[in-house]
Amino acid sequence: MGKQVYLVDTPVATVWTSAQSPGAGDEEALRNPANMKQWLTGLSLEQRHELWRKNKIQTQVLYGRKVIVHKTEGKWAYISVPEQPSSKHPDGYPGWVPRCQLRQGEEWPQDTAVCAIKKPFAMLYDENQLSLFEVSFQTRFSVVDETKDRFVVKTVRGKTASLKKQDVQLKGSSPGSQGRHMLDAGKMFLGLPYLWGGMSGYGYDCSGFSYTMVLAATGRAIARDAHEQAKGGTTVPLGSIAPGDLLFFAHEEGKGAIHHVGIYAGEGKLLHSPKTGRPVELLDMEGTIYEKELCGARRYWM
């Protein structure tokens, strides 16, 4: 089959390295709708470690986002994610997702009002205001109408649903400076366990965290992986970094390959999602390995 455009039809679609990557305990991540909380709650620390040790997960994609389907094999589809640029594939980050989590269709018109979830999670309601499913931070919707306290939005399946206005932010209405907005958004997730490949309010890896906070503050998608994020934006001398700048860390005390990214929080502090077994944290870098491995900074905000 040739390239075909599909939309993600589950709260969060996990993009696996292969159709054989999921194992025992991953069933909740493969259904539609995926039950992310139940899946992640059921994983042991060892199973979480295996996600990166065995490179099981590539990335994740939020509800309603476009993917390109290149081929299908049984219940699986090999896709790429245009909104997550990567040197791994010219059409965006690649991997495998269950076909049941995709629905063929086109992106919502660009001239419509767009809202994004501004809380870690929010409930999507059907036309009768009954709960449909929970959606993650930065899931975006096309607004087709509004009431006193809700936005009426279009769903992937063509029907309408609603979101409470208190849970969303209209596109272009980020408060204050973009750098500060990145930090305010990121601090909502302090204590959230790290997830290899994570790109949602249920768990982030380091570059998924920085990617999402840049998107929240600026509306712009950047490269998915840390070493490629280190090539974008504007170079900032380490002596001139400001809150909201992305900081990059490399092996060999900053001289080797880049392996980590976080957000500068001011006063020598780093806001980041460190690694499996440790949650999103606000860390004073002085005297830590991060102080030794700091190798560069980039600014994606204005």
Image (spheres, rainbow, N blue to C red):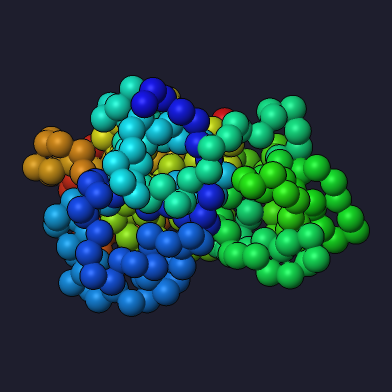
132, 201: nearer the viewer: 132
Q: Is residue 16 left or right of residue 117?
A: left
Residue occupying image coordinates x 25% and y 76%: 44
Q: Quadrant of residue 227?
A: top left
Toward which corner of the image does residue 270 lie, by quadrant? bottom left
Q: Position of residue 276 (x, y in %)?
A: 25, 64
Q: Is residue 213 above or below residue 289?
A: above
Count of residue discs: 0
Q: Residue furthest right?
A: 148
Q: In which quadrant of the rendered view does residue 27 lie?
A: bottom left
Query: Horizontal and vertical percent for residue 257?
Result: 15, 36
Compared to 40, does 209 lie above or below? Answer: above
Instruction: Classify the position of the N terminus by image quarter.
Output: top left
Q: Is residue 206 visible?
A: no
Instruction: Tell me what residue is drawn at x 80 percent, y 42 percent.
Output: 144
Q: Is residue 189 left or right of residue 239?
A: right
Tell me, yes or no, if residue 81 can be seen here. Answer: yes
Q: Residue at x 58, y 59 (%)?
A: 135
Residue 13, horizontal then vertical, whole percent: 43, 52
Judge from the rendering whether residue 20 lies leftward or rightward of residue 138; answer left or right.
left
Which of these two is toward me, 167 or 33? Answer: 33
Q: Farthest residue toward the left?
A: 252
